[in-house]
Image (tube, grey):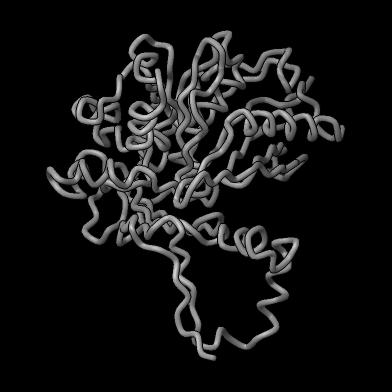
Amino acid sequence: MAKKYAAAVDQGTTGTRFMAFDHGGQVAGAHYLEHEQIYPQAGWVEHDPMEIWARTQDVIKAVLEKGDVSADEIASIGVTNQRETTIVWNPKTGEPYYNAIVWQCTRTKDICDELAEDGGQDRFRAKVGLPLATYFSGPKIKWILDNVDGVRQAAEKGEAIFGNIDTWEIWWLTVGPKGGADVTDVSNASRTMLMNLETPDWDQEILDILGIPRQMLPEIRPSSDPEIYGYTPKDGPLGAEIPVCGDLGDQQGAFVGQTCFSPGEAKNTYGTGCFMLLNTGTEPVPSESGLLTTLGYKMGDEPAVYALEGSIAITGALVQWLRDNLEFFESSKEIEDFAKQVEDAGGIYFVPAFSGLFAPYWRSDARGVIVGMTR
Protein backbone atom coordinates (compact mmCIF):
# COMPACT_ATOMS: atom_id res chain seq x y z
CA MET A 1 0.00 0.00 0.00
CA ALA A 2 1.26 3.50 -0.89
CA LYS A 3 2.72 5.51 1.96
CA LYS A 4 0.60 8.66 2.04
CA TYR A 5 1.17 10.05 5.50
CA ALA A 6 3.70 11.13 8.11
CA ALA A 7 2.37 10.90 11.66
CA ALA A 8 3.24 12.54 14.96
CA VAL A 9 2.55 12.03 18.64
CA ASP A 10 2.39 15.42 20.37
CA GLN A 11 2.52 14.79 24.12
CA GLY A 12 1.99 18.09 25.90
CA THR A 13 1.59 19.36 29.44
CA THR A 14 -2.20 19.22 29.41
CA GLY A 15 -2.91 16.50 26.86
CA THR A 16 -1.86 14.20 24.03
CA ARG A 17 -2.56 14.55 20.31
CA PHE A 18 -1.99 12.18 17.39
CA MET A 19 -1.93 13.66 13.89
CA ALA A 20 -1.36 12.38 10.37
CA PHE A 21 -0.23 14.69 7.56
CA ASP A 22 -0.37 14.14 3.81
CA HIS A 23 2.39 15.05 1.32
CA GLY A 24 1.04 18.59 1.09
CA GLY A 25 1.30 19.09 4.84
CA GLN A 26 -2.47 19.00 5.31
CA VAL A 27 -3.96 17.30 8.37
CA ALA A 28 -5.57 14.01 7.33
CA GLY A 29 -6.54 12.91 10.83
CA ALA A 30 -6.19 14.13 14.42
CA HIS A 31 -7.45 13.41 17.92
CA TYR A 32 -6.71 14.97 21.32
CA LEU A 33 -7.29 13.94 24.94
CA GLU A 34 -6.39 15.68 28.20
CA HIS A 35 -4.84 13.96 31.22
CA GLU A 36 -5.00 14.66 34.94
CA GLN A 37 -2.85 17.34 36.57
CA ILE A 38 -1.68 16.14 40.01
CA TYR A 39 -0.77 18.65 42.75
CA PRO A 40 0.39 16.72 45.88
CA GLN A 41 1.30 19.94 47.69
CA ALA A 42 1.97 23.60 47.02
CA GLY A 43 4.44 24.03 44.15
CA TRP A 44 4.50 20.33 43.23
CA VAL A 45 3.18 19.19 39.84
CA GLU A 46 2.99 15.58 38.65
CA HIS A 47 1.53 13.44 35.87
CA ASP A 48 0.74 9.74 35.85
CA PRO A 49 3.08 8.22 33.21
CA MET A 50 0.80 5.23 32.64
CA GLU A 51 -2.15 7.55 32.03
CA ILE A 52 -0.07 9.42 29.46
CA TRP A 53 0.76 6.18 27.65
CA ALA A 54 -2.91 5.12 27.82
CA ARG A 55 -3.98 8.46 26.32
CA THR A 56 -1.35 8.04 23.60
CA GLN A 57 -2.82 4.68 22.62
CA ASP A 58 -6.34 6.10 22.74
CA VAL A 59 -5.64 9.04 20.41
CA ILE A 60 -3.83 6.78 17.92
CA LYS A 61 -6.72 4.32 17.87
CA ALA A 62 -9.26 7.16 17.54
CA VAL A 63 -7.58 8.51 14.39
CA LEU A 64 -7.35 5.06 12.82
CA GLU A 65 -10.95 4.20 13.73
CA LYS A 66 -12.24 7.30 11.94
CA GLY A 67 -11.20 5.53 8.75
CA ASP A 68 -9.54 8.41 6.90
CA VAL A 69 -6.03 7.14 7.72
CA SER A 70 -4.80 3.54 7.61
CA ALA A 71 -1.72 2.47 9.58
CA ASP A 72 -0.40 0.76 6.44
CA GLU A 73 -0.34 4.16 4.73
CA ILE A 74 1.84 5.81 7.41
CA ALA A 75 5.47 6.12 6.29
CA SER A 76 6.97 7.18 9.64
CA ILE A 77 6.23 8.53 13.09
CA GLY A 78 7.82 11.34 15.08
CA VAL A 79 7.37 12.42 18.68
CA THR A 80 7.20 15.91 20.12
CA ASN A 81 6.81 16.42 23.82
CA GLN A 82 6.62 18.59 26.92
CA ARG A 83 10.26 19.09 27.81
CA GLU A 84 12.10 18.56 31.13
CA THR A 85 9.29 16.45 32.67
CA THR A 86 11.06 13.53 34.33
CA ILE A 87 10.19 9.82 34.59
CA VAL A 88 12.23 6.98 36.12
CA TRP A 89 10.98 3.46 35.43
CA ASN A 90 11.85 -0.23 35.48
CA PRO A 91 12.92 -1.29 31.96
CA LYS A 92 11.97 -4.90 32.66
CA THR A 93 8.34 -4.14 33.53
CA GLY A 94 7.66 -0.62 32.28
CA GLU A 95 6.39 0.37 35.73
CA PRO A 96 7.33 3.90 36.87
CA TYR A 97 8.98 4.17 40.26
CA TYR A 98 7.23 7.50 40.81
CA ASN A 99 4.90 9.87 39.01
CA ALA A 100 6.37 12.08 36.30
CA ILE A 101 7.75 15.25 37.88
CA VAL A 102 6.53 18.01 35.58
CA TRP A 103 8.70 20.86 34.29
CA GLN A 104 6.58 23.36 36.28
CA CYS A 105 7.29 21.61 39.61
CA THR A 106 9.37 23.56 42.14
CA ARG A 107 10.15 20.78 44.65
CA THR A 108 13.85 20.78 43.71
CA LYS A 109 14.46 24.34 44.97
CA ASP A 110 16.55 23.14 47.92
CA ILE A 111 18.66 20.92 45.63
CA CYS A 112 19.29 23.84 43.27
CA ASP A 113 20.11 26.20 46.16
CA GLU A 114 22.58 23.69 47.61
CA LEU A 115 24.29 23.19 44.24
CA ALA A 116 24.50 26.97 43.80
CA GLU A 117 26.46 27.36 47.05
CA ASP A 118 29.57 26.48 45.03
CA GLY A 119 29.72 28.70 41.95
CA GLY A 120 26.31 30.36 42.09
CA GLN A 121 23.25 29.87 39.92
CA ASP A 122 25.41 29.83 36.78
CA ARG A 123 27.69 27.07 38.08
CA PHE A 124 27.09 24.81 35.05
CA ARG A 125 25.95 27.42 32.51
CA ALA A 126 29.23 27.48 30.53
CA LYS A 127 28.81 23.76 29.80
CA VAL A 128 25.05 23.31 29.51
CA GLY A 129 23.72 26.79 28.70
CA LEU A 130 21.27 26.69 31.61
CA PRO A 131 21.10 28.18 35.11
CA LEU A 132 20.48 26.07 38.20
CA ALA A 133 16.69 26.10 38.28
CA THR A 134 13.82 23.82 39.25
CA TYR A 135 12.73 23.83 35.58
CA PHE A 136 15.31 21.32 34.38
CA SER A 137 15.49 17.52 34.61
CA GLY A 138 18.81 16.93 36.38
CA PRO A 139 17.67 18.08 39.84
CA LYS A 140 14.39 16.18 39.36
CA ILE A 141 16.30 12.94 38.72
CA LYS A 142 18.40 13.59 41.82
CA TRP A 143 15.24 14.16 43.87
CA ILE A 144 13.80 10.79 42.79
CA LEU A 145 17.10 9.00 43.47
CA ASP A 146 17.35 10.60 46.92
CA ASN A 147 13.71 10.36 48.01
CA VAL A 148 12.06 7.30 46.47
CA ASP A 149 12.96 4.08 48.28
CA GLY A 150 15.09 1.64 46.30
CA VAL A 151 15.48 3.71 43.13
CA ARG A 152 19.16 4.56 43.55
CA GLN A 153 20.00 0.90 44.16
CA ALA A 154 17.89 -0.10 41.16
CA ALA A 155 19.65 2.48 38.96
CA GLU A 156 23.07 1.18 39.97
CA LYS A 157 21.96 -2.34 38.99
CA GLY A 158 20.55 -1.22 35.63
CA GLU A 159 16.97 -1.69 36.81
CA ALA A 160 15.94 1.97 36.66
CA ILE A 161 16.17 4.21 33.60
CA PHE A 162 15.42 7.89 33.15
CA GLY A 163 13.64 9.57 30.32
CA ASN A 164 11.85 12.75 29.50
CA ILE A 165 8.44 12.24 27.90
CA ASP A 166 9.98 11.69 24.45
CA THR A 167 12.02 8.74 25.71
CA TRP A 168 9.00 7.32 27.55
CA GLU A 169 6.78 7.54 24.46
CA ILE A 170 9.38 6.19 22.02
CA TRP A 171 10.25 3.34 24.40
CA TRP A 172 6.61 2.26 24.61
CA LEU A 173 5.93 2.80 20.89
CA THR A 174 8.87 0.51 20.06
CA VAL A 175 7.76 -2.53 22.15
CA GLY A 176 8.56 -1.23 25.64
CA PRO A 177 9.72 -3.99 28.05
CA LYS A 178 10.40 -6.30 25.09
CA GLY A 179 13.34 -4.16 24.00
CA GLY A 180 12.03 -0.66 23.34
CA ALA A 181 14.41 1.99 22.02
CA ASP A 182 16.00 3.87 24.94
CA VAL A 183 16.79 7.13 23.14
CA THR A 184 16.37 10.88 23.29
CA ASP A 185 17.32 13.62 20.85
CA VAL A 186 19.69 16.55 21.27
CA SER A 187 16.90 19.08 21.85
CA ASN A 188 15.44 17.17 24.79
CA ALA A 189 18.84 16.19 26.19
CA SER A 190 19.85 19.85 26.23
CA ARG A 191 17.01 20.52 28.71
CA THR A 192 18.26 18.10 31.36
CA MET A 193 21.16 20.29 32.60
CA LEU A 194 23.29 17.16 32.09
CA MET A 195 24.34 17.47 28.43
CA ASN A 196 27.47 19.34 27.36
CA LEU A 197 26.50 21.66 24.51
CA GLU A 198 29.85 21.34 22.78
CA THR A 199 29.94 17.54 22.60
CA PRO A 200 26.85 17.04 22.59
CA ASP A 201 26.91 14.18 25.12
CA TRP A 202 26.25 13.58 28.81
CA ASP A 203 28.74 15.48 30.97
CA GLN A 204 30.37 13.07 33.41
CA GLU A 205 31.52 15.78 35.83
CA ILE A 206 27.96 17.07 36.29
CA LEU A 207 26.62 13.52 36.61
CA ASP A 208 29.14 12.88 39.38
CA ILE A 209 28.23 16.09 41.22
CA LEU A 210 24.51 15.25 41.11
CA GLY A 211 25.11 11.56 41.85
CA ILE A 212 23.31 10.31 38.75
CA PRO A 213 24.51 6.96 37.30
CA ARG A 214 25.30 7.36 33.61
CA GLN A 215 23.83 3.95 32.76
CA MET A 216 20.31 5.15 33.57
CA LEU A 217 20.41 7.81 30.82
CA PRO A 218 19.17 7.28 27.25
CA GLU A 219 21.32 7.42 24.13
CA ILE A 220 21.41 10.89 22.55
CA ARG A 221 20.44 10.79 18.86
CA PRO A 222 19.75 13.31 16.07
CA SER A 223 16.28 14.86 16.01
CA SER A 224 15.66 13.33 12.60
CA ASP A 225 17.59 10.09 12.30
CA PRO A 226 17.95 8.09 9.06
CA GLU A 227 19.16 5.14 11.16
CA ILE A 228 15.69 5.01 12.81
CA TYR A 229 15.11 4.65 16.56
CA GLY A 230 12.93 1.55 16.22
CA TYR A 231 9.66 0.18 14.83
CA THR A 232 6.15 0.00 16.19
CA PRO A 233 5.01 -3.65 16.64
CA LYS A 234 2.08 -5.23 14.81
CA ASP A 235 0.42 -5.97 18.15
CA GLY A 236 0.73 -2.33 19.30
CA PRO A 237 -1.83 0.49 19.02
CA LEU A 238 -0.98 1.11 15.36
CA GLY A 239 -1.27 -2.54 14.34
CA ALA A 240 1.61 -2.21 11.86
CA GLU A 241 5.41 -1.96 11.76
CA ILE A 242 6.18 1.72 11.24
CA PRO A 243 9.59 3.37 11.71
CA VAL A 244 9.91 5.86 14.57
CA CYS A 245 12.63 8.26 13.49
CA GLY A 246 11.83 11.80 14.64
CA ASP A 247 12.07 13.42 18.07
CA LEU A 248 11.93 17.07 19.13
CA GLY A 249 11.01 18.88 22.31
CA ASP A 250 7.73 20.69 21.68
CA GLN A 251 9.21 24.19 21.47
CA GLN A 252 11.98 23.04 19.16
CA GLY A 253 9.28 21.26 17.14
CA ALA A 254 7.49 24.59 16.72
CA PHE A 255 10.87 26.17 15.90
CA VAL A 256 11.32 23.71 13.01
CA GLY A 257 7.65 23.88 12.04
CA GLN A 258 7.91 27.66 11.68
CA THR A 259 10.98 27.10 9.43
CA CYS A 260 13.44 29.00 11.62
CA PHE A 261 16.35 27.53 9.67
CA SER A 262 18.59 30.61 9.34
CA PRO A 263 20.46 32.52 12.06
CA GLY A 264 18.33 35.41 13.29
CA GLU A 265 14.99 33.75 12.59
CA ALA A 266 12.76 33.28 15.64
CA LYS A 267 9.37 32.01 16.75
CA ASN A 268 7.19 32.61 19.80
CA THR A 269 4.68 30.01 20.99
CA TYR A 270 1.80 30.61 23.39
CA GLY A 271 0.71 27.34 24.96
CA THR A 272 0.82 26.11 28.55
CA GLY A 273 3.73 28.51 28.84
CA CYS A 274 5.28 31.03 26.47
CA PHE A 275 8.54 30.28 24.68
CA MET A 276 10.57 32.35 22.23
CA LEU A 277 13.47 30.69 20.37
CA LEU A 278 16.03 32.46 18.17
CA ASN A 279 18.27 30.56 15.73
CA THR A 280 21.95 31.31 16.47
CA GLY A 281 23.50 28.95 13.92
CA THR A 282 25.87 26.04 14.44
CA GLU A 283 27.70 27.46 17.48
CA PRO A 284 26.20 27.92 20.96
CA VAL A 285 25.89 31.60 21.93
CA PRO A 286 26.06 32.42 25.66
CA SER A 287 23.49 34.86 27.03
CA GLU A 288 24.24 37.74 29.38
CA SER A 289 20.55 38.58 29.75
CA GLY A 290 19.05 35.55 31.48
CA LEU A 291 18.14 33.65 28.32
CA LEU A 292 18.86 29.95 27.83
CA THR A 293 21.42 28.59 25.38
CA THR A 294 19.88 25.42 24.01
CA LEU A 295 19.94 22.94 21.13
CA GLY A 296 17.49 23.79 18.37
CA TYR A 297 17.72 20.59 16.33
CA LYS A 298 20.06 18.19 14.57
CA MET A 299 19.12 16.62 11.25
CA GLY A 300 20.98 13.38 10.53
CA ASP A 301 24.72 13.90 10.10
CA GLU A 302 24.42 17.67 9.64
CA PRO A 303 25.82 19.99 12.34
CA ALA A 304 23.57 20.72 15.30
CA VAL A 305 21.77 24.08 15.24
CA TYR A 306 21.60 26.10 18.46
CA ALA A 307 19.15 28.66 19.81
CA LEU A 308 18.63 31.26 22.50
CA GLU A 309 15.39 30.81 24.42
CA GLY A 310 13.22 32.99 26.62
CA SER A 311 10.85 30.86 28.72
CA ILE A 312 7.72 31.90 30.65
CA ALA A 313 6.17 29.12 32.75
CA ILE A 314 2.49 30.04 32.93
CA THR A 315 0.36 31.51 30.13
CA GLY A 316 -2.30 29.12 28.82
CA ALA A 317 -2.06 27.21 32.11
CA LEU A 318 -3.58 30.29 33.75
CA VAL A 319 -6.70 29.83 31.62
CA GLN A 320 -6.87 26.21 32.77
CA TRP A 321 -6.54 27.39 36.39
CA LEU A 322 -9.39 29.87 35.95
CA ARG A 323 -11.50 27.06 34.47
CA ASP A 324 -10.69 24.23 36.89
CA ASN A 325 -9.95 26.01 40.18
CA LEU A 326 -12.09 29.14 40.12
CA GLU A 327 -14.70 27.65 37.74
CA PHE A 328 -15.18 30.93 35.88
CA PHE A 329 -16.24 29.01 32.75
CA GLU A 330 -16.66 25.45 31.49
CA SER A 331 -14.58 25.67 28.30
CA SER A 332 -11.30 27.50 27.80
CA LYS A 333 -12.68 28.91 24.53
CA GLU A 334 -15.11 31.07 26.53
CA ILE A 335 -12.33 33.33 27.80
CA GLU A 336 -12.30 35.25 24.52
CA ASP A 337 -15.93 36.29 25.03
CA PHE A 338 -15.13 37.46 28.56
CA ALA A 339 -12.17 39.50 27.31
CA LYS A 340 -14.33 41.24 24.70
CA GLN A 341 -16.73 42.52 27.38
CA VAL A 342 -14.31 45.23 28.58
CA GLU A 343 -12.20 47.88 26.87
CA ASP A 344 -9.07 47.11 28.88
CA ALA A 345 -7.88 45.63 32.18
CA GLY A 346 -8.44 48.86 34.10
CA GLY A 347 -4.86 48.98 35.34
CA ILE A 348 -5.01 45.53 36.93
CA TYR A 349 -2.46 42.92 36.02
CA PHE A 350 -1.89 39.35 37.14
CA VAL A 351 1.61 37.90 37.45
CA PRO A 352 0.94 34.11 37.31
CA ALA A 353 4.19 33.00 38.96
CA PHE A 354 2.72 29.65 39.98
CA SER A 355 6.07 27.98 39.23
CA GLY A 356 8.22 30.94 40.16
CA LEU A 357 9.59 33.28 37.50
CA PHE A 358 11.54 31.90 34.53
CA ALA A 359 13.52 34.07 32.08
CA PRO A 360 15.20 36.36 32.69
CA TYR A 361 14.90 36.27 36.50
CA TRP A 362 15.00 32.54 37.38
CA ARG A 363 13.38 32.99 40.80
CA SER A 364 11.78 29.77 42.03
CA ASP A 365 10.69 31.56 45.23
CA ALA A 366 8.45 34.06 43.37
CA ARG A 367 4.68 33.66 43.74
CA GLY A 368 1.63 34.79 41.79
CA VAL A 369 0.22 38.24 42.50
CA ILE A 370 -2.67 40.46 41.37
CA VAL A 371 -1.71 44.16 41.28
CA GLY A 372 -3.72 47.32 40.78
CA MET A 373 -7.03 46.47 42.45
CA THR A 374 -9.30 49.21 43.83
CA ARG A 375 -12.61 48.92 45.60
Which residue is more in the foreground, 292 or 162? Answer: 162
Percent from the top left, x then y, of residue 237? 73, 22
Quadrant holding the N terminus: top right
Give the quadrant of residue 322: bottom right
| Residue beneath the point at 40% across and 22% down | 149
- Residue 162 in percent (x, y) is at 42, 25
Front position in the image: 102 or 124: 102
In the displayed structure, does residue 369 sit left or right of residue 329?
left
Q: Position of residue 91 (x, y in %)?
A: 50, 14
Kindly indicate the quadrant of the structure image that contains residue 291: bottom left
Above/below status of 6 relative to 129: above
- When the figure is inspected, residue 283 is found, relative to residue 173, above or below; the finding is below
Q: Residue at x 47, y 65 (%)?
A: 352
Pick the quarter of the image with the C terminus: bottom right
Image coordinates for residue 100, horizontal then vertical, percent: 50, 34
Q: Quadrant of residue 52?
A: top right
Placement of 346 over or under 290, stated as above or below: below
Q: Can residue 266 be seen? A: no
